[in-house]
Image: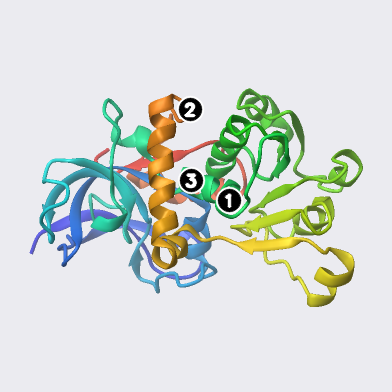
């Protein structure tokens, strides 16, 4: 029985109950790769899972993490990517030295990129692209409001919306405004004062909503009646409610939910388009190698605490071998 180091969540008491320990190394089943993890992506969903708030999330004890990049070391499938290929994708238990990854969702890391630089390709960037294009139907000249613009998905969304010719209004903490402007945002507002949106935007065509309770009401109010779209893919500040009365009389806008894993399973043709478009963006130089801040695996619990407290910016990763 081969063992490996991993971060195991022991309860739903939060990141403080995430511990580094030895567990059994997984074995790939049919249609899966065993990947030696070089870098594991850290996302707010990892925080939500530690409290049991993530829909369909694992039951403790479990190996945490679900985004990884690294080298294929064995496979339960033939005819796709060979052993030795560096890939990025998702798989339960990514905060470990090895992870099992579904082959259908694994993407070869672009030539010349490191594994860490490719983190976000099939998660952050795919989510941002799905919110903007297949669901948000953004067009050049439209106005897009992006919440949590300094985060992994937010930064990708700002860059993509700017690339597609939209006017970008973003929200972020004041200390992060300059970084968000540098990505292509036309206007950056204080994330702690979402009511500022009501007097400054004049109505937007598309809202990317990932914060939830703290911004949801302002997002609905900011969207143009009837034609305005609100794509919801997160609730980092807590859940928000929406009634049929709201949709008919107060906020007659289009509200769409997005979970990239559900999209991949339920609309595989759309997901394949996303991956193809992302590779085109790489080829065009629009999507350049990421620059995640890499931490030792043992620092994972502390990093999740900082992420929960919004003390981080940009993409973060864990190195299981340091």
Q: Residue 25 has which mark? A: none
- Name the spot of residue 86 as percent of width and height, x first: 22, 39
Q: Residues within 10 Å of mark 3 (few under 14, many from 20)?
A: many
Q: Which quadrant holds the C terminus?
A: top left
N-terminal label among 3 and 1: 3
Secondary structure under tag 1 reads helix
- Name the spot of residue 20 as percent of width and height, x first: 32, 54
* Residue 124 visible in the displayed image: yes
Single out the mark in the foreground, 2 or 3: 2
Q: Quadrant of residue 160?
A: top right
Q: What is the spatial separation of the Cα atoms under label 1 and label 2, in whole angstroms?
A: 17 Å
Residue assigned mark 3: 124
Q: Quadrant of residue 316?
A: top left
Residue at (84% x, 75% y) in the render: 245
28 up-or-down from 314: above or below = below
Secondary structure under tag 3 reads helix
Q: Pointers 3 and 1 in contact (CB under 8 A)?
A: no
Q: Residue 131 has which mark? A: 1
N-terminal label among 2 and 3: 3
């Amino acid at each position: 029985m081969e063992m490996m180091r991993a971060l195991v969540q022991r309860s739903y008491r939060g990141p403080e109950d995430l511990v580094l320990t030895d567990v059994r190394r997984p074995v790939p089943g049919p249609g899966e790769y065993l990947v030696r993890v070089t870098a594991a992506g850290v996302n707010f969903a990892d925080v939500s899972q530690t409290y049991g708030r993530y829909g369909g999330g694992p039951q403790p004890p479990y190996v945490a993490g679900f985004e990884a990049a690294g080298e294929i070391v064995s496979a339960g499938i033939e005819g796709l990517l060979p052993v030795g290929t560096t890939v990025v994708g998702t798989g339960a238990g990514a905060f470990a030295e090895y992870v099992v990854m579904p082959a259908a969702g694994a993407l070869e890391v672009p030539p010349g990129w490191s594994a860490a630089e490719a983190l976000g390709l099939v998660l952050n960037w795919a989510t941002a692209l799905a919110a903007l294009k297949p669901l948000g139907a953004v067009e050049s000249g439209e106005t897009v409001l992006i919440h949590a613009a300094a985060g992994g998905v937010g930064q990708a969304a700002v860059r993509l919306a700017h690339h597609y010719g939209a006017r970008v209004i973003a929200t972020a903490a004041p200390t992060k405004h300059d970084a968000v402007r540098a990505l292509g945002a036309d206007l950056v507002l204080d994330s702690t004062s979402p009511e500022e949106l009501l007097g400054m935007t004049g109505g937007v065509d598309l809202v990317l909503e990932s914060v939830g309770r703290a911004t949801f009401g302002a997002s609905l109010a900011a969207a143009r009646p009837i034609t305005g779209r609100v794509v919801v893919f997160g609730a980092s500040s807590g859940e928000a409610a929406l009634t049929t009365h709201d949709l008919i009389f107060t906020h007659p806008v289009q509200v769409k939910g997005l979970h990239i894993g559900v999209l991949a399973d339920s609309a595989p043709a759309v997901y394949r388009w996303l991956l193809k478009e992302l590779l085109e963006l790489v080829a065009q130089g629009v999507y350049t190698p990421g620059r995640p801040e890499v931490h030792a695996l043992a620092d994972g619990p502390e990093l999740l605490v900082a992420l929960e407290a919004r003390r981080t910016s940009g993409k973060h990763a864990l190195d299981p071998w340091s």
